[in-house]
Image (tube, grey):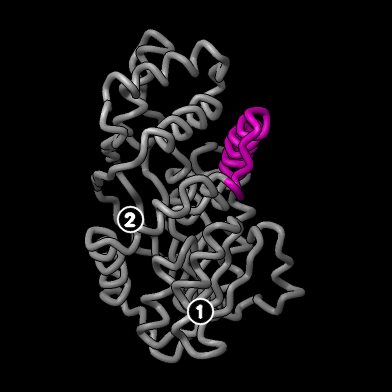
Amino acid sequence: MNDFFNEAFWEKAWKDHGDAILNKMNKAGIAPAKAFDHKAKTFNEQSFSEEGRKRTNRIINWLEGQGVRFENTSVLDIGAASGVFTVPFAERGANVTAVESSLPLVELLGENTAKFTENKVEIVPEPFEDIDVQAKGWRDAFYLVFVSMCPVIYSWENVENIIGCARDFCYISMPADSTEHSLFNEIAPLITGSTFKKKPTEMSYLLHLLYLKGYSYESLITRETKTMEISREAALQEIMNWLRSQGLPTDGQNLQTVTDYLDRTYPSGKVVVRQSGRYGKVLIRLKDQNMHIREDL
């Protein structure tokens, strides 16, 4: 059988790829559930800035253009962060269950959703992958399951668990290739002697397996760029975490190299960071899927 059309082959390839990334992070001492802890405040400010709100509205407008509604619906927001989508979903009339594992982000999420009436937003402060969705009563329980740029997407098994919570729609977004990060581009030659090279990401596994398994879906890949200003201390931590994730040494020598570079290049203490890359959005139509299944029967 041609492996291009072999579901099991692609499921294993994605699982192996995801396991390799998780093992690499574990060896580097990076816990995915806490990866955002150190930049929760900055992330929250960016999310609710004018630029952040515009990005959020573009995505919600795209969903509404595909027939998704929010008034009097139930939404499961996985990887809700500080409420960048939870808040506008609730403002549009949805009842939102927000899953977030980073405790600093959970605290900000609580502050940002405190204005809503009781039961409008339920916060679940734990990793989605640790939740027994059957025991929770979440199987087929939500009109829309929404997952935006969340590291829970690292195997088809996880995707099936996510889709299993949705009745009508499931939205997943993730990078379509590795993000270009100005700081990493600046630092890489100093540490490795070569430029940082972009790598493909798991988006291709997701799209191919959705196709092979017969799902109905819309997908959109766009190129996006954002600029932000962070403190020199936050930049240092960001770079050291990146070095760990790449399997590069974070010893005293490299720490000094990075510190000297930041001191020399950004004497004001404010570091301007530019991120750009291609990002994919997928809206899976479960109602269409169920209709096709019934017709086949």
Q: Of helix, strand and loop, which mostly describes the magenta segment?
A: helix
Viewed as shown, does residue 238 lie left or right of 106? left
Q: Residue at x 72, y 75 (%)?
A: 136
Q: Position of residue 212 (x, y in %)?
A: 50, 53
Closer-to-camera residue (185/207): 185
Q: Residue at x 67, y 28 (%)?
A: 27
Q: Is residue 57 above or below residue 205?
A: below
For residue 102, what is the image quadrant? Answer: bottom right
Q: Say which quadrant the N terminus sits in.
A: top right
Extreme right residue here?
135
Q: Is residue 80 above or below residue 195?
A: below
Residue 96 is tagged as 1
Extreme top residue here?
193
Q: Is residue 283 above or below residue 2?
A: below
- Mark closest to the chain's N terminus, 2 or 1: 2
Q: What is the CA distance from the residue labelled 2 to the residue labelled 1? A: 22 Å
Instruction: Kindly identify the amino acid type of the residue bearing the numbered disc 1.
Output: Val
Q: Residue at x 66, y 57 (%)?
A: 129
Q: Residue at x 44, y 76 (%)?
A: 288
> Dot 1, crowdedness within 10 Å: few (<14), some or many (≥20)?
many
Residue 194 among magenta residues: no
Residue 46 is tagged as 2
Q: Of helix, strand and loop, which one carries label 2?
A: helix
Instruction: Kindly identify the amino acid type of the residue bearing the numbered disc 2.
Output: Gln
**Residue span colored magenta:** 9-34
For residue 48, what is the image quadrant? Answer: bottom left
Closer-to-camera residue (148/234): 234
Nearer the viewer's eye, disc 2 or disc 1? 2
Q: Of helix, strand and loop, which one carries label 1?
A: strand
